[in-house]
């Protein structure tokens, strides 16, 4: 049983398209993170949120606590957005759960 | 440069050997973490540390030992490596949470160590 499910697993988009990656979780959480893993392997934290919505440049993350769902949106996608996007949640018991990631390829 | 570094970046070893993976951060972050990443499993927490001399188990601690004698260093030791420990290992650090929980803090990840156990 996976506590965190991401969809889709793989996504290919044309440059400029609007992209949505979804994350559903089954545990009560204190915070949710979106991470980006570059093709070279490095991991960067994009967002940490526990409610509402956050925006950074072309990236938008939303969370619905009642529905246990979060989405990561990328507007005007670019080939440099090609990466694996990972959803991670933590509960009040200091337990961590990571999704297996969504592999995004943006074609010029 | 400031940041979080891991060494070695690549390591090949044999079953039964002891291996130590190093992690060093220059931010004086209180918390440090070790994860392993395997296909189909995503990232899994091995151990974490809240401060020097304070460590705690994560989801998959068996076969691993950690220590933290200094705030900036958090080595991970495989006492007797097994093939199932072939993986990519990531170290991360984060600052003190203002009353929040472990994952209620932004984490900064090292570049990873790819370990192969033959």
Image (tube, coloured by chain):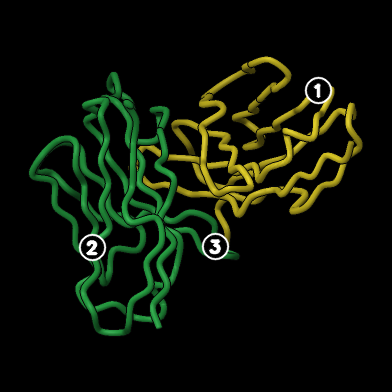
Chain colours: A yellow, B green
Query: Which residue is disc 2 drawn over?
Result: B20
Q: Considering the numbered disc 1 on the image, is that residue within a helix, a strand or a loop?
A: loop
The image quadrant that residue A90 belongs to is top left
Q: Is residue B67 above or below residue B53?
A: below
Frontmost residue, B16 versus A95: B16
Image point (70%, 48%), residue name: A102
Q: Position of residue B36 (x, y in %)?
A: 42, 58
* Same-subunit check for callouts 3 and 1: no
Q: Which quadrant does the N terminus of chain B fall into?
A: top left
Q: Position of residue B50 (x, y in %)?
A: 20, 37
Query: Which residue is disc 1 drawn over?
Result: A75
Q: Nearer the viewer, mark 2 or mark 3?
A: 2
Q: Position of residue B95 (x, y in %)?
A: 29, 26
Q: Considering the numbered disc 3 on the image, is that residue within a helix, a strand or a loop?
A: loop
The numbered dot on residue B41 is: 3
Q: Position of residue B75 (x, y in %)?
A: 21, 53
Q: Nearer the viewer, mark 3 or mark 1?
A: 1
In the picture provided, is A72 more to the left or to the right than B107? right
Q: Is residue B62 above or below residue B1?
A: below
Q: Considering the numbered disc 2 on the image, is that residue within a helix, a strand or a loop?
A: strand
């Amino acid at each position: 049983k996976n506590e965190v499910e991401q969809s889709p697993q793989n996504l290919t988009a044309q440059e400029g398209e609007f992209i949505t990656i979804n994350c559903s979780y089954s545990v009560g959480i204190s915070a949710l993170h979106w991470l980006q893993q570059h093709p070279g392997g490095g991991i960067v934290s994009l967002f940490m949120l526990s409610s509402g919505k956050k925006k950074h440049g072309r990236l938008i993350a939303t969370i619905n606590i009642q529905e246990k769902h979060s989405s990561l949106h990328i507007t005007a996608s670019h080939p440099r957005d090609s990466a694996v996007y990972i959803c991670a949640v933590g509960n009040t018991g200091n337990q961590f759960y990571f999704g297996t990631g969504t592999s995004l390829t943006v074609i010029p | 440069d400031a940041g979080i570094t891991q060494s070695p970046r690549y390591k090949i070893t044999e079953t039964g050997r002891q291996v130590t993976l190093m992690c060093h951060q220059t931010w004086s972050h209180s918390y440090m973490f070790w994860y392993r990443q395997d296909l189909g499993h995503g990232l899994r927490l091995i151990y974490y540390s809240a401060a020097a001399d304070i460590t705690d188990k994560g989801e998959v601690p068996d076969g691993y030992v950690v220590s933290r004698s200094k705030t900036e260093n958090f080595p991970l030791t495989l006492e007797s490596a097994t093939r199932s420990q072939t993986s990519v290992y990531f170290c991360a650090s984060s600052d003190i949470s203002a009353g929040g929980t472990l994952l209620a803090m932004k984490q900064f990840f090292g570049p990873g160590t790819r370990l192969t156990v033959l």
